[in-house]
Amino acid sequence: MTAYIIRRLMYAIPIAFGVSIVCFALVYIAPGDPLQTILPEDASEETIMMVKKAYGFDKPIPVQYAIWLGKVLTGDFGISIATGRPVTDEIFKALGNTILLAAGAVLVAFTLAFSIGTIAGYRVGSFIDRAVTGIAVIGVSVPNYWLGIVLVIVFAVELNVLPATGMGPRGSDSFNIFEWSNFRHMIMPIVTLSLIPIGIIARTTRSAVAEVLNQDFVETLRAKGLMETEILLHVIKNSLPQVLAVMGLQFGYLMGGSILVETIFTWPGSGFLLNKAILTRDLPVLQGTILVLAIIFVATNLVIDLLQTAVDPRLKRS
Amino acid sequence: MKTLKRLAAAVSVTAGLAMAGQAANAESVLRVAMTAGDIPIVIGQPDQGFEGYRFVGYNLYDTLTLWDLSQGETAADIKPGLATSWKIDPNDNKRWLITLREGVKWHDGCDFVPEDVVWNFERISKEDAPQFNVKQFGMIRNRTGNIDKVEVLGDHDIAIVTKTPDALFPYQLSYWYMISKCRLTELNNDYEAYANAPSGTGPYKFDKIVPQERLELVKNEGYWDKGRVPKHDRLVLIPMPEATTRAAALLSGEVDFIEAPSPDTIPRLESAGMQIVTRAYPHNWSYQLNFVDGNFKHKEVRQAANYALNRPEVKALLNGYMVEGYTNVPPSTPYHGTPSVKYEYNPEKATELLKSVDCYPCKITLAISTSGSGQMQPLPMNELVKSQLDAAGFETELKVMDWNALLDVGRPGREKNPDIDGINISRALQDPFSALIRHVYTKQHAPKGSNWGHYSNPEVDALIDEIYLAFDPAVRLEKLTKLHELMVEEATLLWVAHDVNPRALAPNVKGFVQAQSWFQDLTPIVVE
């Protein structure tokens, strides 16, 4: 197992390197000058050149990449053009805020989706199955930004029972999840974020459980006289690798934060940060955030691979 | 019985005093939702466009000349700020003699002295000065680039020498914020540290910042202009780029004041008792034209485009939240004048003009954005403009791009994009230079300046040269008026709308007067 883990970790290195090249190059392919938004519209060419030089944007792109990568390897993502603050601070603070939402959404979505998906898979064709399929279709079809706006209208504007924006009355610096006045700010974003994973995971779980149930070994278990709950446990174990793969992807997406959901709820997470960086062409923030999120994605997939292998050792051999 | 009565009286007096004390201690807070995606930087010249100037710049800091934002009937003009008076040296038309205000203190307690102005000038101009900041240099260079030197003349007097005579120079001073030499020096010129403890002379002092989320300022009791000491204790500025979110935050009581609600949410806000304030201000939604490469080089084509537009229809599209733009500046501007032509909707005349220069159908390409700062509702507005132009004989192609991509087309000028005939970048017209000169002066040809389409007219250039030499305000006003009238007659832009910048305020917010300006004074606001 150790050798397998080391081998998988080694595979992750070139992936991370490739990701760094892609995320560095992508932001240059997009039109727009990084200094555009910080300089006045009638800044002269001479002024622009001087500021470009100061930020190192006058150097050839491969040189800029080498300098950037060298710094990144030491944990320095540079300084935000827009705010002048270290990018590392900006990313990890935002990431911390996103993790709060992602963890909540993971808890809600994975538990709920896995439970209802299993029941539906076990009772294919029943009323429960149809209901779960309906929920799943709604989950994958309803745009989460639309749901977010609807929730805001209903619960913040009309009923005035939940806050519409931000991370508590004094901001994220004094956010305490154990205080109701703060926690209530998380409810609507978490519900909004959970919708898609609920739909996808419930569907996957349902089909995985239904598929395993049709396999011969289930009949053998029944013939051996096992109780239905014991059979179900075997079925769940056999359907887990497939479900885990989907959960891993969803976890990765949630960790990346949702640009739309975080913008709607003014939640200062990585999605909100990314949105701001895109709009202002804040290249250091953009590159740093994309790289960190991509590495989290790679790491999540690695962990899921390892978990799948632990659940089903046959996968290691393949 | 007597004892009981005394006890009751004592209890009620104590309760009354406690309540009075509580009321006296209750902090009044004004919470503002800005359209900005982040908190504007606080180290002097703010970013986030003029919203940064409006909410951070003029609240934390002062400029030598300030804007008079106390009324909304006419366009705002400059007034004394940290400078109490200014005049041109009678013997040298490049030397401004400026008297500074006495008794002004920085938020850190230091006195404001003439040396501070020299130090602030070096901060944005002298590369080897320890306080020099290249980003701040870039952000204000377009306003201070004409300054040659700043001299201290006495305890309260300075002279600013410009490179060329510039009668409009006092306007440029209104954008240049003075920051505390004491504070930055104390922090070893570290701007990152200064951003957590900025010090100005403005009506609010810095209290705290939560990056990305909120900036909290508190009332400066010792502000030099006693009439502008804030009437609330705390100002909380929250970046909230999504219009629907801003409206929801106001409706749910999380903020008291929102910028730019979208027109379709205004009826809902009104029905909830919110106050909608709106007024024309120097903000043009128009197209700058290419005067060299395409069909707009013909004055007839430019005029035809202006006649082809049915502006009341555009106004209806925006639920009435605009002023029809027939001229470059709104009619309430002192130098609006009475142009000899008025581009009221006349498609027949437009067609006739196009035929007169043999441009029928007349192909034009307009570069537009999907969104962007001050762009109002760019997609539906541009679609409507296109349909109106085409109905009069144009064949319009809209080149739709991202906001930053459009800025990339706008900054270098027409030479880099000769296939584009017009760019839809809305413009601030805050002062005469921004409103008029930069669009038509030959010396302002892009990429050096903002004359994107390279308009050139010896008569206009001569008039602008005269304006720069007109130190008598009456003479200057006359020449500015003439310049504006000429621009309208020449159809130097395709004018569509003047924005009216709606804002929505909670019912308990009183005392706000919306000035005809990009900048607004929040200090008179009382939060009941």
Image (spheres, rainbow, N blue to C red):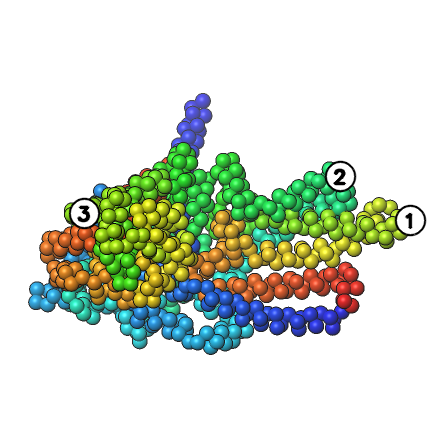
Can you tell which mark lies on residue B341? 3
Give the chain letter at badge 2: A
Dot in front, 3 or 1: 3
Q: Does residue B314 appear to the left or right of A141 in the view shown?
A: left
Tell me the kind of residue under disc 2: Ser
Query: Residue, x 40% and y 61% (percent of image)?
Result: B405
Give the class, few, some or many, for how many residues have Cα within 10 Å of label 3's Cα (few <14, many ≥20): some
Can you tell which mark lies on residue A223? 1
Give the structural element (helix, strand or loop) at label 1.
helix
Tell me the kind of residue under disc 1: Ala
Q: Does residue A49 appear to the left or right of A228 in the view shown?
A: left
The quadrant the C terminus of chain B occupies is top left
Give the class, few, some or many, for how many residues have Cα within 10 Å of label 1's Cα (few <14, many ≥20): few
Q: Which residue is mark 2?
A: A126
Residues at marks 2 and 1 touching, judged by CB atoms closer than 8 Å? no
Give the chain letter at badge 1: A
Query: Residue, x 31% and y 49% (percent of image)?
Result: B393
Mark 3–mark 1 distance (CA, rounded to whole Å): 96 Å
The quadrant the N terminus of chain B occupies is top left
Dot in front, 3 or 2: 3
Residue A1 in the image, given as x and y percentages of width and height = 76, 69
Dot in front, 2 or 1: 2
Which quadrant of the figure has residue B399?
Answer: bottom left
